[in-house]
Structure formats: C-alpha cells, structure tokens
Amino acid sequence: MKRLPSAAGSAYPVSRTRKDECFKKTFSIVLEVLKNDDDSYDLFSRGELARSRVPERWLHHELCVGFGFCGDEYEAIIRLLNDCGKATVVL
C-alpha cells in the first residue's frame, strides 16, 4: 500500500484500486449502441462489450436502468439508431 501525504502533512494509506478508480472518473464515459441485422443490439461501454445481443424489447431497460439514459437521452439514442444503426454518447 502506497502512502500519500494529506493536506495536513500526515501520511494516510491509499490502495491502488481506490487510486485507479478516481483516475478513471476523470475521463469521458463513452457508450456505443450498435444495431445488429437480427434487430438485436450490442452495447459497448468504454470501448468494451458490456451487453451483447440485447433484444429490442429489453433495450429501454438496459439503457435506462443499466446505464441511466432515460427520457430525452433515450429518445435521442433511438433516433440515432433508426437513422444510422449506431449511436454514440460521450459524457
């Protein structure tokens, strides 16, 4: 465990996992949704496959409950999917 100085000058332990977690939060989160030929969807988060072959009837649940894209954000994603077959969200 690495010790980093605090604001008061004393050292406190910081685990590597905690340090890495804070580091990741400083970058943009990207969600990509791709429409497959069989009308299912693949969802990628941070460039990695998060959900595969999601049926159209479960897409709202995955985007809203799983990733927090509800309401107007969800509608914008659906519009992009209908127009291009792909939607990318950058925060």
Image: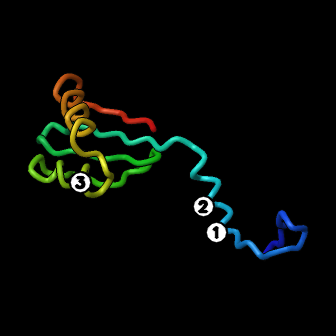
Q: Position of residue 10 (x, y in %)?
A: 88, 73
Identify the element where label 1 is drawn: helix
In the rendered view, tell whether residue 3 sits above or below residue 23. below
Residue sitting at x 47%, y 44% = 29
- In the rendered view, does 21 fall on the left or right side of 44? right
Total residue callouts: 3
User: What amino acid is labelled 3 in the image?
Assistant: Glu
In the rendered view, tell whether residue 41 sits above or below residue 19. above
Q: Position of residue 89 (x, y in %)?
A: 38, 36
Give neighbour class at mark 1: few <14, some 14-19, many 20+ (Cα, 10 Å). few
Q: Residue furthest top?
A: 83
Q: Which residue is mark 2?
A: 21
Q: Mark 3 or mark 1, which has the lower sequence index?
A: 1
In the rendered view, tell whether residue 81 sits above or below residue 22. above
Q: Mark 3 or mark 2, which has the lower sequence index?
A: 2
Residue at mark 3 to residue at mark 2: CA–CA distance: 23 Å
Q: Which residue is mark 1?
A: 17
| Marks 1,2: beta carbons within 8 A | yes
Give neighbour class at mark 3: few <14, some 14-19, many 20+ (Cα, 10 Å). some
Residue sitting at x 65%, y 60% = 20
Q: Picture quarter containing residue 32?
A: top left
Q: Residue furthest right?
A: 9
Q: Position of residue 60 (x, y in %)?
A: 17, 49
Q: Position of residue 84 (x, y in %)?
A: 23, 24
Q: Which residue is mark 3?
A: 62
Residue sitting at x 35%, y 54% = 50
- Identify which residue, 48 or 64, lies in the foreground: 64
